[in-house]
Image: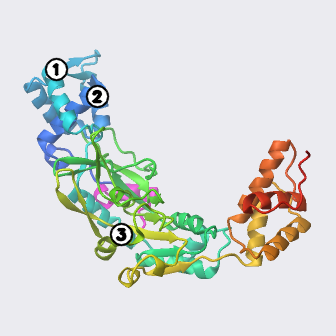
């Protein structure tokens, strides 16, 4: 499903027709959030931010004034906050709210339990429904999309076809091959196959606990073509608790542990940290360097059996409450080891696509080498290149995709050190080769 919006038809479509543009709640009931929860949230915001105008408060919590009115009226009745005016226009925009002594005491207690004081969350039920409307399984990957995503990338058509088919299947991919063959680079380029936008909530409310979800390091916000309306406007058309975003790509590596795949509560900050696959919903999750994690590959891969089968995962709050969350993720495993060395047959059957990335052919290697030369403004030299290939032949090393970049970077580093222009010649090739492969030097053009 493509969620892109055609501005030319904007006047013909209602907000309710577009899952990226849910109508803003006009009443407290339409937020689906408990009244006392919102009281605590506003108290913590005022506790952390100090005095705030009504407009500033609405912008911070991402709820219209029509929703805040009832909550703030209750807080004033309970003598939790005080209202004043800082302008002379006589409008609601001049109203300023400040916590009273009683309000500060209560807000301090609220903060000691959970310190979240950001935008109002959405319910888990709302999130699940919205994710179904913008599911990754509805996204179509075509040959043209794959060719565009891997334009100017040296890779065989077979591998591109495997990538495209795997994305359409929704099943997990296992990319394997020797270290340096370009697995991680090719996996990251899969982000180019993600089309359309998704709506990501700032946070989720689960059993009275808030789980922050929107992460600017993961979710790239997209400018909406339809004005969102002002939150101070009581008719604000869009629910601004949701952020329009590109489909995410999350990449984890050797730092991954079983604990990071569950919901974590930081006792110091009193905030939850969402696991990477929850942030990756609607997009791609890459488990890079599988086999180098601090837990065994078997334990790690067994963790994914239920989510991969049922498209659902179970997380646990610090109070022990367990709850289901959607698992709408294209998962990609990448490893230097073959799949049979990492998992048993039961798990391997769940891996829809096992894609081998091998060393480059001679023609592919030369194409990559020329591309890197162009990128680093190095003039390609036939004699230097033939000298390089001769060293590969003599030392019986495979032509790996990472070598041109790594070797030419060394030549560029040396030129910077010497204050000269980098040049390709047999001496500079030998210099880079001996550093990179820890070979015995054959010659050196560094002046002693």
Q: Quadrant of residue 410?
A: bottom right
Q: Is disc 1 in contact with disc 2, using a CB cutoff of under 8 Å?
A: no
Which stretch is magenta? 1-20
Considering the image in quadrants, where does the N terminus appear? bottom left
> Under tag 1, what secondary structure?
loop
Q: Quadrant for the C terminus, please.
A: top right
At 51% from the left edge and 63% from the top edge, which residue is drawn? 191
* Relative image position of residue 174 (x, y in whole percent): 48, 75
Labels 2 and 3: the sequence-earlier one: 2
Q: Give above or below for 355 relative to 243.
A: below
From the viewer's perspective, tell me whether residue 390 is left or right of residue 299.
Answer: right
Residue 67 lies in quadrant: top left
Locate residue 43: give its quadrant: top left
Q: Gap between marks 2 and 3, in whole Å?
A: 42 Å
Q: Residue furthest front?
A: 440
Q: Earlier in the sequence, mark 1 or mark 2?
A: 2
Percent position (x, y) of residue 95? 24, 22
**Disc 3 marks which residue?**
299
Rendered location of residue 178, percent (x, y):
61, 73
Label 2 sits on residue: 48
Q: Secondary structure at mark 2?
A: helix
Rendering coords of residue 17 (x, y %): 31, 61
Q: As rendered, which of 414 and 279 lies closer to the eye?
A: 414
Residue 232 visible at all: no
- In this rendering, is residue 113 above or below 398? above
Which numbered disc flags the more N-terminal residue, 1 or 3?
Answer: 1
In this orientation, which residue lies closer to the viewer: 68 or 89? 68
- Kindly state the secondary structure of the residue where label 3 is placed: helix
């Amino acid at each position: 499903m493509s969620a892109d919006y055609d501005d030319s038809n904007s006047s013909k479509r209602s907000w309710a027709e577009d899952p990226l543009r849910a109508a803003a709640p006009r009443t407290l009931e339409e937020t689906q959030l408990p009244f006392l929860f919102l009281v605590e949230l506003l108290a913590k915001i005022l506790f952390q931010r100090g005095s705030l105008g009504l407009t500033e408060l609405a912008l911070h919590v991402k709820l219209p004034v029509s929703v805040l009115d009832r909550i703030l009226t209750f807080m004033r009745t309970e003598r939790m906050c005080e209202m004043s005016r800082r302008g002379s226009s006589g409008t609601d925009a001049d109203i300023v709210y400040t916590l009273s002594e009683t309000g500060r005491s209560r807000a301090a207690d609220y903060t000691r339990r959970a310190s979240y004081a950001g935008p109002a969350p959405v319910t888990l039920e709302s999130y699940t429904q919205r994710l179904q409307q913008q599911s990754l399984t509805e996204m179509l990957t075509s040959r043209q999309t794959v060719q565009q995503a891997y334009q100017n990338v040296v890779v065989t058509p077979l591998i591109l076809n495997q990538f495209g088919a795997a994305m359409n299947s929704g099943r997990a991919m296992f990319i394997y091959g020797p270290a340096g063959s370009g697995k991680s680079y090719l996996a990251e380029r899969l982000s180019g196959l993600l089309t359309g936008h998704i709506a990501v909530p700032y946070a989720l409310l689960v059993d009275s606990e808030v789980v922050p979800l929107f992460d600017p390091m993961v979710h790239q916000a997209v400018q909406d073509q339809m004005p969102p309306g002002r939150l101070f406007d009581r008719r604000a058309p869009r629910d601004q608790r949701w952020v329009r975003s590109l489909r995410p790509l999350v990449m984890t590596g050797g730092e991954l542990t079983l604990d990071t795949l569950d919901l974590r509560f930081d006792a110091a900050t009193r905030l939850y940290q969402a696991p990477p696959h929850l942030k990756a919903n609607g997009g791609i999750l890459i488990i890079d360097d599988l086999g180098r994690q601090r837990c065994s590959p078997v334990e790690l891969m067994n963790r994914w059996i239920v989510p991969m089968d049922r498209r659902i995962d179970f997380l646990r709050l610090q109070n022990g409450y367990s709850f289901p969350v959607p698992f709408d993720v294209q998962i990609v495993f990448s490893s230097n080891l073959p799949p049979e060395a990492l998992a048993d047959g039961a798990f391997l059957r769940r891996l829809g696509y096992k894609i081998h990335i091998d060393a480059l052919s001679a023609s592919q290697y030369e194409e990559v080498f020329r591309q890197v030369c162009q990128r680093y403004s190095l003039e390609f030299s036939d004699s230097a290149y033939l000298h390089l290939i001769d060293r590969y032949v003599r030392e019986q090393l495979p032509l790996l995709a990472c070598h041109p970049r790594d070797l030419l970077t060394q030549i560029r580093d040396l030129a910077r050190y010497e204050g000269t222009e980098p040049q390709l010649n047999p001496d500079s090739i030998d210099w880079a080769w001996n550093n990179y492969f820890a070979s015995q030097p054959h010659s050196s053009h560094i002046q002693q």
